[in-house]
Structures are given as C-alpha cells and as structure tokens.
C-alpha cells in the first residue's frame, strides 16, 4: 500500500534577489525498490557540494536514477514508505540481497557479503544519516542488538551496519537526511 504523497516546497530568489516559492508540488521522483515487497522511495532533494551553492533558482542537481548514498561531498533527503516485512526475506540468497541494493546503485553496501542472519537487508554506507520516523514504527537492527523506533523518534546512523524491519501490519513512513562521510581508516 502506498501512502499519500506529500508536498515539496522549494524556495529561491527572483532576479531582484527577493525570496520566492520556486516549486510547490509532490516530489518529482518516486520509485518502488525491490518489487512488491520493497519500500517506496520519494526523492526530495540532493546537493552535490559542501558548502552547498545558494543561487537564484537553479533547482535540484539532476539525477537519472534513485541512488542510496548522497553525491560525494553532498547531501540527500528522501522519504521512505516501508511495508511490513515479507516472509520471503527469510529465504533471500546473498545474490538476491545484492540485487535488491543494486537497484539503487549500492550492491557493495550489502553486509557480510549478503550472508548476514540478522536481516535480509543489512547494509552499511559511508554516510551520516538522520532518520526521523514520521508515522508507524520500525525495528533498527544492528550487528549486536536492536531497538524499536516510533513516530517522533530520530536515529543518527553513523556509517554502521544495520537493517530496518517492519514487524507491524502497516507501512512505516520515515524521512532520511543523508550526508556524505568518510570512514576512519580503522573502520574502513
């Protein structure tokens, strides 16, 4: 089940430098990843540099595909609708796990060469991610331990191996702000 879209309001400047509403509408890029059992990705915005350039009204840097990580030296904000875990997750092969993440350019993010027994979608990216649960709940699964996060909870994911399980009977909506990072050599 897909949740209702939300508005993306983008501000900018007119030629005289006055603040304006540049865009107001649903996010332009929406895609389900992983077939019928996968999450719906709503790509909201990305930046490609730090500091991010602020100009009159250039808009979002173009991207042709949904990509898990933010651009190098950039950021990304997206909203995910994560459906309840499907029983098929328990029987996914390492190749199927990698194929799931390959859809978003991140086959190499799959943990333990796809053999993790913690969750079928365990993964790790070289990013700092702020995850804000908007509706519903998820279980954040780590290599050791797990915790349930609910609406209003905020997770700061610091380049750690993790998975998200939806053990309820309804979708969870979560917003992620991803920031390009760099592993300490001891963690790379």
Image: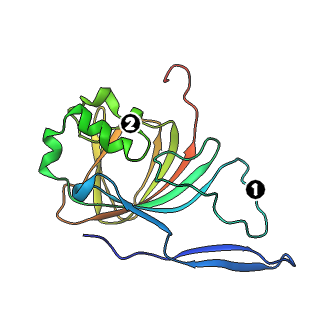
Task: Tell whether 159 sits left or right of 164.
Answer: right
Residue 132 sits above or below residue 113 on the image: below
Q: Secondary structure at mark 2?
A: helix
Q: Position of residue 3 (x, y in %)?
A: 32, 72
Q: In this picture, is 101 found above or below 81?
A: above
As drawn, the label of residue 107 is 2
Query: In the image, is 32 to the left or to the right of 105?
Result: left
The picture places residue 131, in percent across and down from the top left corner, at 44, 54
Q: Measuring from the top left, give residue 15's x and y in whole percent.
A: 84, 77
Q: Eyeballing the image, is 19 above or below 155?
A: below
Q: Nearer the viewer, mark 1 or mark 2?
A: 2
74 over 19 or under it: above or below: above
Q: Alpha-carbon distance for marks 1 and 2?
A: 30 Å
Residue sitting at 31 percent across and 36 percent down?
98
Q: Which mark is residue 95?
A: none
Which percent across, then down, holds residue 43? 48, 61
| Quadrant where the N terminus is found in the figure | bottom left
Which dot marks residue 53?
1
CB of mark 1 within 8 Å of CB of mark 2?
Answer: no
**Which residue corresponds to the image point at 73% horizontal and 49% vertical from the top-left?**
51
């Amino acid at each position: 089940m897909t949740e209702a879209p939300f508005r993306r309001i983008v501000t900018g400047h007119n030629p005289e430098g006055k603040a304006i509403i540049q865009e107001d509408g649903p996010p332009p890029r929406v895609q389900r990843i992983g077939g019928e059992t996968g999450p719906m990705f709503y790509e909201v915005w990305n930046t490609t540099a730090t500091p991010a350039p602020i100009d009159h009204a250039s808009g979002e840097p173009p991207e042709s595909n949904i990509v898990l990580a933010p651009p190098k030296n950039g950021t990304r904000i997206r909203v995910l609708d994560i459906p309840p875990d499907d029983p098929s997750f328990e029987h996914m092969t390492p190749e199927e796990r990698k194929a799931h993440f390959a859809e978003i350019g991140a086959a190499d993010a799959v943990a333990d060469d796809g053999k993790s027994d913690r969750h079928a979608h365990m993964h790790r990216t070289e990013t700092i991610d702020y995850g804000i649960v908007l509706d519903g709940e998820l279980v954040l699964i780590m290599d050791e331990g797990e915790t349930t996060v609910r609406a209003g909870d905020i997770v700061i994911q610091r380049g750690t191996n993790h998975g998200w399980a939806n053990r309820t009977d309804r979708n969870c909506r979560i917003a992620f702000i991803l920031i390009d990072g760099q592993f300490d050599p001891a963690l790379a």
